[in-house]
Amino acid sequence: GLRQHTPRATNKRSCVAAYTAKKSAMSGPKSVSVFLDFENLVMGAMAAFPRAQPLPLALEPIVDFACTKGSVVMRRAYADWMHPECQKYVSALVEFGFELVYLPQTSRQGKNGADVRLAVDVMEAMEQLPIDIVMIGSGDTDFIPVIQKVRNRCKECVVVGFEGTVGRLVKANTTEYASLDDLCSAFLSVPAVPLEMRGKRGVRARRWKTRRERGGPRPGGQRG
């Protein structure tokens, strides 16, 4: 008689996953662009690791984490580099290959417009480069629209930040969230200050001062 053909049982999801993995392997590592809202990260580090030496914010675990995602093709950090707390990191950032974008404080509250400039740069980078993954270092909810734009273009958007500074909606909208409490704690061999203790008496985190409070010159050359 005729030999009966029995179709193999297949799993549609596993087939799609296998195809995606094969395509990824053929196309090489994914390209990653890193954008750091540096003042946001420094403030978060000062609260989480106030006694860490030599500095509260460890850059190496951030860079290492980005490299695990693929080939890093762009590295930018945004801050008022005249601020003493940010100046401490300039040399290390340059050594790690970051382009430093200077954004002077433009308000009495110390805001410097990093969210707007960073968002514009992310969109321009996606237009000009074949980027697969956008990594944003910040927890500011102002970045939710740009995170959604990245996802709408079928790109991955990874966010890294310190607990207590990353909004719930940021975590919900991003492709992946990585806690710098965990990444930096492992690197520094120092536990992060418990979230409920940050900013309270007994935790000696240095307060972020605006240019006006420091008595420094304003962008126009006048003193505050």
Image: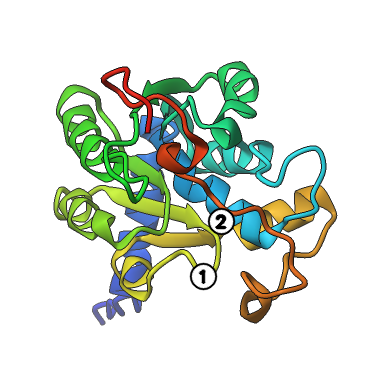
Q: Quadrant of residue 181?
A: bottom right
Location of residue 204 in the rendering, given as x and y in whole percent from the top left corner? 74, 61
Q: Quarter holding the C terminus?
A: top left
Please name the amino acid that badge 1 sits on.
Gly
Q: Residues within 10 Å of mark 2 (few under 14, many from 20)?
A: many
Question: As drawn, is 216 to the left or to the right of 156?
Answer: right
Q: Which is nearer the eye, 222 or 156? A: 222
- Depicted 161 relative to depicted 164: above or below: above
- Depicted 172 relative to depicted 43: above or below: below
Location of residue 88 in the rendering, given as x and y in whole percent from the top left corner? 64, 28
Q: Residues within 10 Å of mark 1 (few under 14, many from 20)?
A: some
How much space separates mark 1 and mark 2, taking CA atoms? 8 Å
Please name the amino acid that badge 2 sits on.
Gly
- Depicted 129 relative to depicted 180: above or below: above
* Residue that badge 2 annotates: 44
Question: As drawn, is 46 to the left or to the right of 136?
Answer: right
* Residue that badge 1 annotates: 164
Disc marking residue 199:
none
Q: What secondary structure is found at the residue carrying circle 1?
A: loop
The residue located at (36%, 31%) in the rendering is 27
The residue located at (37%, 45%) in the rendering is 110
Q: What secondary structure is found at the residue carrying circle 2?
A: helix
The residue located at (47%, 26%) in the rendering is 81
Instruction: Answer whether labels 1 and 2 touch (C-beta < 8 Å).
Output: yes
- Depicted 172 relative to depicted 29: above or below: below
The residue located at (63%, 81%) in the rendering is 196
Q: Quadrant of residue 34?
A: top left
Location of residue 179 in the rendering, given as x and y in whole percent from the top left corner? 57, 62
Location of residue 10 in the rendering, given as x and y in whole percent from the top left corner? 33, 74
